[in-house]
Image: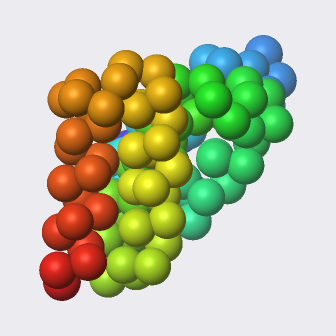
Amino acid sequence: MELFAAQLADRIRVKGPGHPGVLSTRFQIAVWTSNAGDPVRAIELFTQLLADSIRVLGEHHPHTVATGYRLGLSARAAGRLDLAAEQFAVTHDEWTNRFGPDSPQARKAGELIYRIKAE
């Protein structure tokens, strides 16, 4: 984690905060934060990153959609089912439009929405 933080500081200094490489490093830090068992902090990181990704890349960019999906996973892990369902619905719509309703991506998002409603 410390290496990602150092890399992030270097990338921001050299390329600026809106560079795609900076966004990618921030994504990795948020993923590892969630994987390390801190979904609440990961929600904060993904929420900030999602806003910046929408601003820099656009709301339909695959990296933006992936950020929203990971935000949904962290929200579900933290028990924030309302936020998780919202993010999975957006992801489902994006992946359905991009890959089709029978794609593995769209099916996975739809399955997660179904599971949240059952919880």
Residue at image x 69%, y 35%?
A: 59
102 and 26: which one is in front?
A: 102
Image coords of residue 15 (percent x, y):
78, 16
| Left or right, 104 with reference to 33 | left
Residue 70 visible, this angle? yes
Residue at image x 31%, y 71%?
A: 76
Q: How is the image coloured?
A: rainbow
Image coords of residue 108 (percent x, y):
21, 43
Q: Quadrant of residue 38?
A: bottom left
Residue at image x 19%, y 54%?
A: 111
| Left or right, 113 with reference to 82 | left
Q: Which quadrant holds the C terminus?
A: bottom left
| Left or right, 5 with reference to 37 | right
Q: Quadrant of residue 24?
A: top right
Note whether 48 is above or below 11 in the view shown.
Answer: below
Note whether 14 is above or below 2 in the view shown.
Answer: above
Residue at image x 27%, y 51%?
A: 110
Image coords of residue 48 (percent x, y):
67, 55
27 and 84: which one is in front?
A: 84
